[in-house]
Amino acid sequence: MNINKIIRTLDLSKSDARDKTIQGIIEYILYAVNENVTIENILEYIKMDLNIELYKPELLEGLETLITAGLVKKDSGSKYSLTDDSKLNLRKFELQNEAAKRKRFEQFSDSIVKYSSKPLSKEDIELLWSNLTEYIYECYLEHGKSALNAFSSKAGY
């Protein structure tokens, strides 16, 4: 089980509005795939990558909203992709997140070095960081199982 995928799914599903969540899922999938894809492909990628089954009508509604907003485009072959502006904005967001992760690690590392009575190697600190973040993800996952169930076809939505 890929915890990062589940965390991303939970993050996307934290919205009170299901339609906005679906739009976020569509944008995420189109960004990850980075090619023109059919509705069937999008549904399959969502199922494979996020373990969520969406109904085709709700996917179509989300796509139409994103097209109207200028975030997604549809080619003549009924394939969808992100607009160039949308790709650029998502890439900026991704870079900001990566920078924030590095900063959190640096702060963690500085604190560990400061408060540890023993000298720690970079590898030791990275192992501690990895274990801490995995623990946090697992806590998030454990308390977020109901969120996954809310977007499962078994939940009756």
Image (cartoon, rainbow, N blue to C red):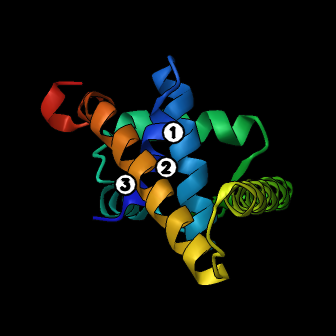
Instruction: Say which element carries label 2.
Output: helix
Crowding at label 2, few (<14), some or many (≥20) Cα neighbours within 10 Å? few
Contact flag, marks 2 and 1 (Cβ < 8 Å): yes
- Tally of marks: 3
**Residue at the image position 84 percent from the left and 57 percent from the top:** 92
**Residue at the image position 61 percent from the left and 50 percent from the top:** 27
Picture quarter with the C terminus:
top left
Instruction: Say which element carries label 1.
Output: helix
Instruction: Say which element carries label 3.
Output: helix
Name the residue nearer the viewer: 63 or 25. 25
Vertical relation: 124 (above or below) 132 = below
Q: Name the residue under label 3.
A: 50
Between disc 2 and disc 3, the foreground one is 2
Give percent across and percent down for residue 113. Answer: 72, 64
Give percent across and percent down for residue 18. Answer: 46, 24
Inspect this view and state whether residue 94 appears.
yes
Name the residue nearer the viewer: 126 or 157. 126
Q: Name the residue under label 1.
A: 11
**Residue at the image position 53 percent from the left and 24 percent from the top:** 15
Between disc 1 and disc 3, the foreground one is 1
Checking the image for residue 8, the label placed there is 2
Label 1 sits on what residue type? Asp
